[in-house]
Image: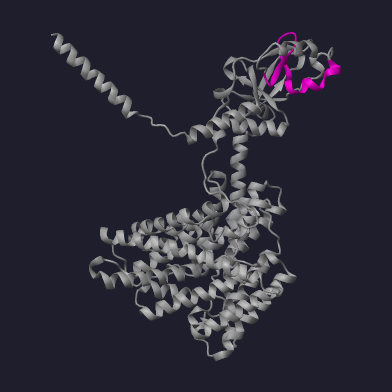
Amino acid sequence: MAKQLNTQNGIPVAVSLLSTLEKEEVRSPEVLNKQRILFMAILAVIVAIVISILAKLLIWLIDLITNVSFFGSLSFSATSPADHHLGLWVILVPAIGGLIVGLMALYGSKAIRGHGIPEAMEQILTNESKIKPSITFLKPVSSAVSIGTGGPFGAEGPIIATGGALGSTLGQLLRITNNERKILLAAGATAGMSAIFGSPIAAIFLAIELLLFEFSPRSIIPVALACITGAAGHHFLFEEGPVFPLAHRLQSASNMALFLYSIMGLVIGFLSIGTTKIVYWIEDMFEKLPVHWMWWPAIGGLVVGLVGYFEPRSLGVGYENITHLLSGQMGLQLVLSLCLFKFISWAIALGSGTSGGTLAPLLTIGGAIGALLGMGIQYIYPESGISVSMSALLGMSAMFAGASRALLTAIVFALETTHQSEALLPLLATCSAAYMVSFFLMKNTIMTEKISRRGVKTPDSYEPDILDKINVVQVLKEQQMVFKEQQTVAELRQHLSTLQLPPHFVMITGEDGEYKGFVPVGSLTHWQQLAETPLSKVLVPAEVAVGLHTTLREAMGVMAQEKVEAIPVLDDSRDSAIVGLLTYPTIIAAYQKGLKDHEKKTPSISLKRKGMKILLRNRNWRQQRQQK
């Protein structure tokens, strides 16, 4: 904690900020911080309530456009475009939808293109979590048009993008920090996912793994409350049961089944890499087309319509396809057809830059692959204990884990949306295997490849800050060079010339020893004409100080705020006496040492040394016995 310095009347007094605030009848920073977290939590809950309502409106809008486009009726009832009777005319419906999306992107905002999560990540990492307010309504409307006209996407991506835009917009209207705006963005996005799927825990993990890039009470509390609110909205506005119900309970997996499920995870890990690379290869091919990008969604829509003519189940959201796959009752030909045609339709549509989500298609494709692998293993090895239903569930989660590298999100999502607790261990084995393959063989994920091409680097680890683990007392040098304020610049320069390794800064005190400030040694070379000037005229005064037990991160924050290169350190156990200066070079040296210690590869227990001690002890014992 920073401490205020008071040197009036020549009496050195260091008063803690806490004491100062108490005298002014103001609450402490700890209390203020907790109240700030509570304030952010209230805002997050408000955003979650609004986004839950928007999620329901989005589903209604998708159903309305689906009924109008494929059945010619003004109805909000849930229908599947797979049941259409349009014949060849079905090819034009997704193309018309793609054309509308292209026009909305051209005259509205280009940011509506894509599946939502990468765009939110980019705004968090590069634009202080600022998303255009227009995305709040442009994204859901464009996605509803795309999905309602047959686009092979899920509603989760658009609502995640909409929730993020709503949270960001609210954050831009209020006086809050960039980090707090990021928290509102993540809270809105994950509340939207929770509202669609009723999966609050998976949504929290999604925020941690893909949006927040941190794990702290200030972010988790608002996000968790937003996700809980979104789940309540799901149960109130949609249904209370699991999104993907199974008519039977899955059985516990045997050791042999777990081993085979792990192998299945490795296979799906490789397929997730291929899926990601194909999607972005198609996007690159669209970039080479000699037409304006506005037309790309319409071209992709033509392919979607053509594929939908041969395989109607590839059209639209297709959540019912996932339920049918999980039942384990679909035949081999149906599963293979769904897997192939859904992938072709989704990859080309997504590569064209239209608006839609990736989660539902990845789940469908992964579930179909898992079911196919399960059928194959059952045929080759009937005693394996493999279940086709379990294989489909593991396949859809492993595909998401491998493609996005959101490991915990994939595992918990499968459990929350099916309520099949017996799948926990197989999910852990399969998703970990897919994640491992993806990590070692693919640089970027389906979520980060696009922004990586724009030069945006996403964090891939969430380790504690090295400077947060080191206190000032651990790095402060006890010996500090001290000069009186009456002494001149020439005297200081003369003394420094006698030292082999001069310090970076010199402390300056008054006649009675009270602290006055410091002089940067590097500046002395520019003060040739000030040789006879007293040090009191050139010193840098300091209005604040830090304690011995302040972390280096906190101290560096105070130094940056005060725009000083060094800051005095107080010892509270000695009447707040100033015991030295903390400088940037000292902090940098501590950081470098922390990195070196973190990477150091040395054994804590030396077997060689221990073995030598045993040999010497045995030799001494033998010698003593011989002497006896």
Q: Magenta segment, which residues?
A: 503-530
Rendered residue at 53%/69% (across/down): 237
> How many numbered discs, if any?
0
Q: Can residue 319 be seen in this view?
A: yes
12 versus 370 height, above or below: above
> Does residue 408 appear in this view?
no
Front residue (pair 515, 499) = 499
User: Residue 96, percent across and down?
Assistant: 65, 81
Q: In this view, does 399 lie to the left or right of 448?
A: left
Residue 338 sits in which quadrant?
Answer: bottom left
Rendered view: 321 above or below 51: below
Q: In which quarter of the image is the C terminus?
A: top left
Is residue 575 found left or right of 611 in the rendered image? right
Left or right for 574, reference 202: right
Q: Please, is residue 414 above or below residue 440 in the view?
A: below
Residue at 82% x, 20% y is 527
| Quadrant in which the N terminus is drawn | top right
Image point (64%, 48%), residue name = 180
Q: Residue 428: percent from the left, percent from the top?
A: 38, 56
In the rendered view, tell whether residue 346 sits above or below residue 52: below
Q: Which of 51 and 350 is in front in this view?
A: 350
Examine the structure image and report whether residue 106 is included in the region drawn in magenta: no
Residue occupying the point 70% across, 66% down: 110
- Front-lying residue, 286 or 309: 286
- In the rendered structure, the answer to whether residue 499 lies left or right of residue 420 reads right
- View extreme (right): residue: 529
In the rendered structure, does residue 512 fall within the stretch colored magenta?
yes
Residue 317 rendering spot, x and y as whole percentages: 52, 74
Pinpoint residue 289: horizontal percent, then vertical percent.
67, 73
